[in-house]
Image (cartoon, rainbow, N blue to C red):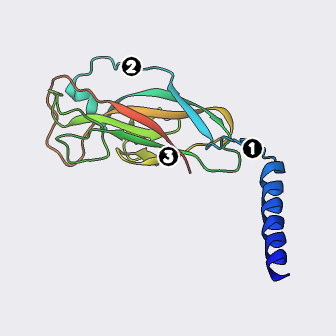
Amino acid sequence: MARLIKQVSSALLLILSGVSAGQALAATTDIKATVMDGNCQVAIDTPTLKFDTKDVTQFATGTAAILPLAVSVNCEGMQGKTPSLTVSGESAQLSDTQLFRSASSTAKYVGFMLKKGTLNNLSDFYNAAGTVAPGDSVAITQDDGTSVQPFSVGLVRSAGDPLLTAGAVSAKITFAFIFP
């Protein structure tokens, strides 16, 4: 009798395992999603700013000329966040490291100063608030949509350096988006 029970239970186990393996159906679904940060497109209204030729005597107040520079920013998915721009560029051979100047410039002790906002007073420009130096970050005034960030670029002599000398001066300024 024990042998019969053992055979029946073994057969029952085989039947059960066969039933469950044979009748079990499987279905698979792929689930995918894309999660991305907000983004901002950055564009400059004038890719090249060209100052008129200036005489060294025109730097008596420190600033010989000021030109506007508009940086357009179009942000999406940034609402409620505080995006910003990082400003980079070279500041070569000057005591005032707030100025932008390429090492290849031949004029000495002169460079470009970048200020937030629209400024036009030559005598106050150098010491006015809002200076943006190489390596600084600037908050974007609008977090979603298109906005224009106004800047002013001054052609200035470097404070703390000897009198400037004639020649050509150039600089590259890069505005890059920083995700908060």
Residue 144: which quarter of the image? Answer: top right
Q: x and y percent of residue 151 in the render?
A: 49, 34
Q: Spot the residue most to the bottom.
A: 2
Answer above or below: position of 54 versus 111: above
Residue 31: which quarter of the image? Answer: top right
Secondary structure at numbered mark 3: strand
CA–CA distance between discs 1 and 2? 57 Å
Which one is nearer the viewer's eye here, 115 or 85? 85
Residue type of the residue flagged with mark 1? Thr
Give the residue displayed 65% in from the left and 50% down from the top. Answer: 81
Name the residue beneath numbered marker 2.
Answer: 48
Answer above or below: position of 53 versus 97: above
Mark 1 / mark 2, whichever is N-terminal: 1
Q: x and y percent of residue 38 in the render?
A: 63, 41
Answer above or below: position of 50 versus 35: above
Mark 3 / mark 1, whichever is N-terminal: 1
Residue type of the residue flagged with mark 3? Val
The image quadrant where one finds the N terminus is bottom right
Residue type of the residue flagged with mark 2? Thr
Which dot, 1 or 2, sits closer to the camera?
1
CA–CA distance between discs 3 and 1? 49 Å
Residue 154: which quarter of the image? Answer: top left
Give the residue displayed 79% in from the left and 55% down from the top. Answer: 18
Q: Is residue 9 visible?
A: yes
Name the residue beneath numbered marker 1.
Answer: 28
Q: Is residue 78 left or right of residue 12?
A: left
